């Protein structure tokens, strides 16, 4: 395991702060996976608030444990996408509407502002963004129960 040419720590506000080998400091960096589906543990950029890459991580598993944990925690926060398992009820078929749903993380409520907040992923997947900017995943519409599909069909 080779030590990276940068240091990473959290500031008092919980943001990641990167200190490069030359001593330059970049506050508020966020990790971004280059290939989140095909190679999630490889090719991770640490991007500064200006949108420019501040550092590159070739392989996550080659980082020292403490550094890897910081990066993984931040990735988990950025990539929080609960999966919808069932739609119990919607308040209205006009938007905005309130949905009561079951997810892989428990029961919750989301507010759908508009039908444009439902995006198709491939043939049978959906990504639904709620009023708080949280994305909910429907991996496969066909795997939902009949009542959930019927409610969802009214918005598609």
Image (cartoon, rainbow, N blue to C red):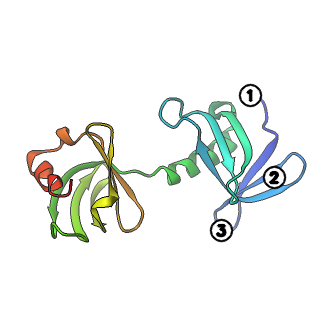
What element does badge 3 sit on? loop
The residue lying toward the viewer, choosing from 154 and 31, is 154
Q: Earlier in the sequence, mark 2 or mark 1?
A: 1
Q: Quadrant of residue 17?
A: bottom right
CA gap, disc 3 and disc 2? 17 Å
CA gap, disc 1 and disc 3? 30 Å
Residue 149 position within the rendered picture, expressed as x and y whole percent measured from the top left:
14, 48
Q: Quadrant of residue 41?
A: top right
Q: Residues within 10 Å of mark 1 (few under 14, many from 20)?
A: few
Residue 127 position within the rendered picture, expressed as x and y whole percent measured from the top left:
34, 50
Residue at 69%, 68% (x, y): give it.
12
Residue placed furthest toward the right: 22
Q: Is residue 143 left or right of residue 57?
A: left
Residue 19 badge: 2
Residue 6 position within the rendered picture, expressed as x and y whole percent measured from the top left:
80, 45
Residue 13 badge: 3
């Amino acid at each position: 395991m080779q030590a990276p040419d940068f240091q990473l720590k959290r500031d008092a506000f919980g943001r990641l702060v990167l200190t490069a080998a030359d001593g330059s400091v970049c506050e508020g960096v966020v990790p971004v996976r280059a290939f989140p589906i095909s190679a999630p543990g490889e090719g991770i950029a640490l991007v500064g608030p200006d949108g420019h890459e501040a550092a590159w991580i070739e392989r996550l598993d080659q980082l020292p444990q403490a550094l890897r944990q910081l990066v993984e925690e931040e990735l988990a926060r950025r990539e929080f996408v609960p999966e919808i398992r069932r739609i119990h009820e919607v308040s209205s078929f006009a938007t905005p509407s309130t949905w009561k749903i079951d997810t892989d993380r428990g029961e919750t409520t989301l507010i759908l502002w508009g039908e444009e907040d439902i995006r198709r992923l491939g043939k049978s997947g959906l990504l639904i963004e709620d009023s708080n900017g949280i994305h909910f995943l429907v991996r496969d519409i066909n795997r939902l129960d009949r009542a959930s599909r019927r409610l969802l069909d009214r918005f598609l």
